[in-house]
Every structure is written in structure tokens, then in C-alpha cells.
Amino acid sequence: MEYLVMAAALILFVLFIFVLESIRAKKEKERFIRSLYDNYGGVPDKKYKLERFERMGRFFERHPEDGQLDDVTWNDLGMDELFKRMDYTFSASGEEYLYYTLRTPKRDRETLLHLEDVVAFFDGHADERVQVQFAMSQLGHMGKYSLYDYLDHLDILGDRSNKKNILMDLLFLPLIGMLWVNFSVGILGIVVLVIFNIVTYFREKGEIDPYITSFSYIMRLMGTAEALERISVPVCKQEWEELRRHRKNLRGMQKNSYWVMSPFRGNSSGSIPEVIMDYIRMVFHADLIKFNSMLKHLRGHVEDVDGMLRCAGYVETAIAVGSFRRSLQNGFCVPEFTQGQEESNRLTKSAGAAERDLPTAGIRMAEGYHPLLDTPVKNSISAEKGVLLTGSNASGKSTFLKTVAVNAILAQTIHTCAADSYRSPFFYVYSSMALRDDLAGGESYYIVEIKALKRILDAAKGGRKPVLCFVDEVLRGTNTVERIAASTQILKSLSGRGILCFAATHDIELTGLLCSDFDNYHFEEDVRDGDVYFNYKLQAGKATTRNAIRLLELIGYDNEIIERASAQAARFMSQGVWDVS
């Protein structure tokens, strides 16, 4: 009787713990779902470990396309920070696809219009959006590695056959039969076989363990795909059909996958049934046999896994775009794209369209700003030819270059601009801005810079047109005379047909030398009351204020230095030669 009472108490305790855990899990799910509703359009606060951020580009690296942003441009524009600002994803596939999207400007309206439809649907259908986000959160992440780190190296495992494992399992049959003939021999044979299988099991288990994580992620991916297919999203009909097709092709991996995917596999702290199954795995190599069959199936369907990652990542990226738009307190717009110059000429001849109605090869941006700035100063620009910026340090030149560049990229990647309006053709985007000495390669700043500029010219010569490029302080790594001469010719080359260049310089001489090729704009500052003030507003024409020496005075330099520098500058401006006296 006492045993029955103790057993009943134990059962009740287990049930109590189970109920409490179920209630806790339910409340946790409800809190998370509520946060998905409440935090849509907020600012993400993710923390990124270095190894996690390093694997972010694996999908991008595996899917090269014409016109993707190169490393120089991506780093120049600080696109890592912009990626973090719009990373509202909950899965590794969503993160990697968002990264790929930001580095892959599109050049066709249809692709961007479809993205617009998906973004608009989820923005207006909160319930469906939350269902998708919850499904993607169940997919989650893999840790510091990308799934592609495994998919692209499946050959490392070599040819794996189940013949040996099955043969060793079949040996148990005659040994069991031996028990009726010679019990001692039969028992000895079974013990020896069990020990041999356990020893060989741990050797092979060590080889496949790193891949179990990837197989588990694929299983979760298939479950996520099935969950997404049940959500009614009419605009994602194509994506849902692709998910269904890829998932069906991978079904062969799911059958009996429990032997490999059990969360308690190899963990003696699991339940009694799981411990028993662990010993079955060790003795009969059940998980090794299933792993080999899963591996064989996966090797023939890697592209199906890739397709599922692409579709799931695309949908989560669209939701991230919608949340990013909502978070832009200073406003946003959907860009308008014009035809190229060749199509404009064709329209002129065929339809006699008025010139003002024709698409242009330039950029027109009204009240644009950089999306990473909380309190930006907005600027507008209408550029039909190159733009040359002058002004002092910290006046706003570099920020303006990045504003135009980032909005051009966002226009062709997420169909969103941080501006009141934006209009341009589809560009190939390049920059040469935040360069550094290549210490590892032994190259000076000047060598790094001229290589960065040459790649832009080579892209245009190679047929990548129209090119939109941004150059900050061209050839700052060399002497004044050669810098001005070389800068003039390089910038002239960057103002040719099919290239639109935005450049910033301190060399005021360039404004006159390039006046026929570039429109001059400037930023200016106001020195008053012993301090310097910047309004960060773009002004037409070249800079006329010269406050560098005045700033030395404000900082507290000796009057003798100030007076001599002022006199020397005045003599150069009037005589055109330097006097060092």
C-alpha cells in the first residue's frame, strides 16, 4: 500500500511539473507574440558577436550576381551598421538573406514591385505577419556557423556506406542462434560484438557530430516551410509553391530521422526511454545508418535546401523592410525609376515626347537624409551631371555623399528611400571614400586609392553602365601639384557618358578646372562668438569661406603662427606663388 501511495505521489509530482512547464511555455509564447505586435516599427536592439557577424555573408557569397556591392563600397558606406539598423529578423536564413539583399541592387522594376507588394501586405495584415515571424523564430539560428559552411563541404565526409554497419548488425542473428548450441560461445560472441560496435560507434560519431547541427536545422527548416504554407498570404503564392516543391523533394530525409535528431542523443541525463535508445544507437549504429542515408539524400538535394532558405529568407526580409519603414520617424518614400539614355532617345524619336516628360540619367532627390541619423538635416539635389562638393572639414560633405549613396542603394535593394522623393535610373554603385593603408599587403594609401579609383573606371569601360560613384578627397595621398593634375583628369574620366560622379574635395582649384564637367556645390560654416557653427545645408556654387586659419585661433594657437599663416595665404592668393618668409 505504501508503495502505491509513493508511486501515486511521484506520478502526481511529475504531472504537476509538466503542467507548470506547459503553463510557463504558453505564457512565454504569448509574451513573445505580443512583443511582435508591439515592437513592429521599433528600433532593433540585437547584440552581435563577432563570429555571428562573420558568417552573415555566406548566402551572399554563394549567390554572386552582376552589380553586387563590392567590399570597398560596402565598407566605405558603413553598410554593416545600416544592416544592423534594419535587422528585424529572427532566423539565420532571414539575416543572411537581408544581408544579401542589401548587397545586391536590382535593375528591374518587376522584382522590386513584387517586393513592394509583399512588404505592403504584411504591413497591412498584422496577424499574418506575426504568424510568419513566429514560424521563423522557431527556425532560429545555428550558432557561429552558417548552414552553407556545412552544405558546401559535404564532400569532406567522403563516401559513407552502411554495408559494414548492417553486416555487424546481422552478425547478432547467428550469435543469438549459437545460444541454443553453445551458450558460452554465444554469450562471448555477443559481448565481443557489442564492445566492438560501441568502440567503432564513438569513432564514427565524432566524425558526424559537427553535421548533426546542420541536419537539425534542415529539419526545422522543413517544419518552418510547412508552417508558412498554412498561412494565407496571396502575394507569396510563388514563394509558397517553391517551398512546397523543395520540401517534398527533401522528404526522404525526414523518415526515421528521430534516430539522428533526438535532442537527448548522447545525453545520459535524458529520460529512461532516451537512455535506452542511446544504447540501441551505440550497439546497433541506428543513428549512423540513418545519418548516412540522410547524407546521401541531401547530397542530391542541396539546391532544394538552398531554395527553401531563399524563399523563407525573402519573406522575413520583406517584413524587416516594412518594420524599417515604420521606424523612420523622418519619413520615407518609394523610389521612382527612369529609363536609360538609350531608351529616352528611342522614345523621343518614336513618340515625339516632350523633353520634360522624358526619363533622365541623373538623380533627383528631395529632402533626403541618412537613415542612421536621429536628427538629420535634409538636403535636396537634382544632378544631371557630376557634382563637386567643397567646404571645410566637418561641414557635411562626407555625410552628404553617403546620404546620396545609401539612398541609391536602398532604392534598388529594398525599394525604400530616406527622402520625400527619389528618382533615378538603375545604377551600378561604387565608392572610393574611407580607404586606409594596406599594411598587410604593404601598399601605401596612395596605391590603395588609385586602385580603388581604377576599378570604377574599369567597371564603366567593361559595360557596367550607368555607374554611380562617390569619391571623397580624390588622391589625398600625394603632393598638391600632382594631386590637382591627376585629380582633374581622373574626375573628367568619371564624368563621361554613362557615369554620374559625386566627389568632395578641399582643392578649390578643381572647381574651376572641372566647371564644364561638374556642377559645384558646397557646405559652409559660420564662425562667431568664439565658436564654429555648421548648418549642414547644401549650397549651390563653390565654397568661398576660408576659416581653417581662423579655427587655429579659436583653438588657442599662438598669435605669431596665426598672423604669419594669414599673411602667407594672402600673398599666395594675390601672387599665385608661395612665400616662406
Image (cartoon, rainbow, N blue to C red):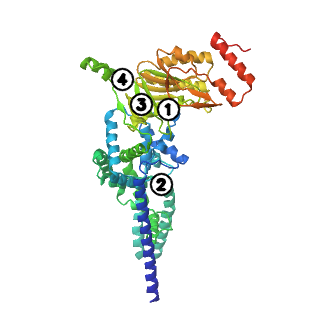
Q: Estimate the x, y position of residue 21 in percent, counting from the top left.
A: 44, 69
Q: Who's the residue at 70% across and 13% down the image?
A: 579
For the residues labelled 2 and 1, say whether their Cβ atoms are less than 8 Å apart: no
Q: Estimate the x, y position of residue 241 in percent, counting from the top left.
A: 28, 47
Disc 3/disc 2 C-alpha distance (Å): 57 Å
Q: Who's the residue at 53% across and 20% down the image?
A: 542
Q: Which mark is residue 402?
A: 1
Say which amino acid is labelled 1.
Lys
Q: Which mark is residue 360?
A: 4
Q: Estimate the x, y position of residue 157 in percent, counting from the top left.
A: 46, 49
Say which amino acid is labelled 4.
Thr
SS type, badge 3: strand
Q: Quadrant of residue 340?
A: top left
Disc 3/disc 1 C-alpha distance (Å): 15 Å
Disc 4/disc 1 C-alpha distance (Å): 22 Å
Nearer the observer, disc 3 or disc 2?
3
Say which amino acid is labelled 3.
Ala
Say which amino acid is labelled 2.
Ile
Disc 4/disc 2 C-alpha distance (Å): 58 Å
Closer to the chain start, of discs 4 and 1, is 4
For the residues labelled 4 and 1, say whether their Cβ atoms are less than 8 Å apart: no
Q: Who's the residue at 39% across and 54% down the image?
A: 37
Closer to the chain start, of discs 2 and 1, is 2
Q: Which residue lies most toward the left here?
A: 351
